[in-house]
Image (tube, rainbow, N blue to C red):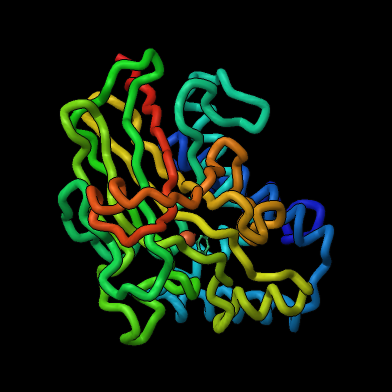
Amino acid sequence: MDFSENDSVDAVLASFADTPDPRLREVMDGLVRHLHGFLRDVRPSLHEWEQAIDFLTAIGQRSDEHRQEFILFSDVMGASMLVETMEATRQAGGASGATGERVDATASTVLGPFHVVTSPERALGDTIDSVGTGEPCLIEGSVRAPDGTTVPGARIDVWQADEQGSYDVESEGRQPIGNGRGLFTADDDGRFWFRSIVPAHYPIPTDGPVGALLRATKRHPYRPAHVHFIVEAPGYVPVTTHVFVEGSPYLDSDAVFAVKQSLVRDFAAVDDADAAARHGLPNPFRRAHFDIVLAPEAS
Ligand code: BEZ
Ligand code: FE
């Protein structure tokens, strides 16, 4: 049979017919059908197809141990958030809220491309900021199960941009690697607290092929201010999430579609000299409360 537009899907599917792993076969089947359907819809010229290949090649070439352009591409296409949301629904056994998140656990959101440095282990109450140019804040909360049981000893990995909206790995010496990052262990009551600075909103990296795509499509590159969290504890489903700073610009137009209202918190201004002294902060300071609820693993 000659290869033709009408028979292209059947010809390629037949070539994968002996795939032993049923899941791989299902994935390849879907990929072939959707890819060929997309190409028949869009009807690229050969030149346009070469441009598409060049774009994907440039994404790979722009990725290394400090830069993950493929994750960025997935993020701006909404693919990361769609997979995150479907995963949360899957882990909840299909029971989910209106936006797809688990109804009883802290909502998840994108990992993003900046979890590329191992966070330094820090003690509760430590600061994750060694530069000292931002507005000091205290972030505190507790890790609990949906029934309110405390989860002692949870591991809390946090990372954030600074007051200029840059991560350590983007700052070319202005911040040491590890600044804005910390790995904490919750206390026996599941509580955690650490000092930091209020992060700023920032543009995702625009000096690569994803930035070129945003410019060509007149999309802005900004993310609202946030702190990333990965929280895990034995026997519980880990959560990858953010706490967003209430009032930040771009909460309603995040370039990577990652805002969930349940994750927005007031970083309230506090004028309390005793509390400031207790936490080793200047007075006044800002304070945010972010409790984490972890779902128990299915037994
Ligand atoms: C971030 O929040 O670090 C991030 C997420 C997606 C794309 C770029 C940055
Ligand atoms: Fe971020």
Q: Compared to 75, does 99 lie above or below?
A: above
Left or right: where 249 falls relative to 288: right
Seen from the viewer's position, the closer of residues 139 and 39 is: 139
Q: Residue furthest front?
A: 273
User: x, y percentage for residue 230?
Assistant: 35, 45
Seen from the viewer's position, the closer of residues 190 and 37 is: 190
Q: Compared to 69, does 40 lie above or below?
A: above
User: x, y percentage for residue 161?
Assistant: 43, 66
Locate residue 40: give its quadrant. bottom right
Q: Say whether residue 17 is visible.
A: no
Q: Compared to 53, does 127 lie above or below?
A: above
Left or right: where 212 falls relative to 67: right
How many callouts does the rendering have? Answer: 0
The quadrant of the picture occupied by the N terminus is bottom right
Which residue is found at the position 46% from the left and 34% from the top?
Answer: 22
Q: Say whether residue 134 is visible.
A: yes
Locate residue 191: give its quadrant. top left
Which residue is found at the position 38% from the left and 13% from the top?
Answer: 147
Which residue is found at the position 52% from the left and 75% from the top?
Answer: 59
The quadrant of the picture occupied by the C terminus is top left
Left or right: where 178 falls relative to 17: left
User: x, y percentage for residue 77?
Assistant: 65, 58
Seen from the viewer's position, the closer of residues 142 and 273 is: 273
Which residue is found at the position 44% from the left and 63% from the top?
Answer: 113
Locate residue 202: give its quadrant. bottom right
User: x, y percentage for residue 274?
Assistant: 28, 47
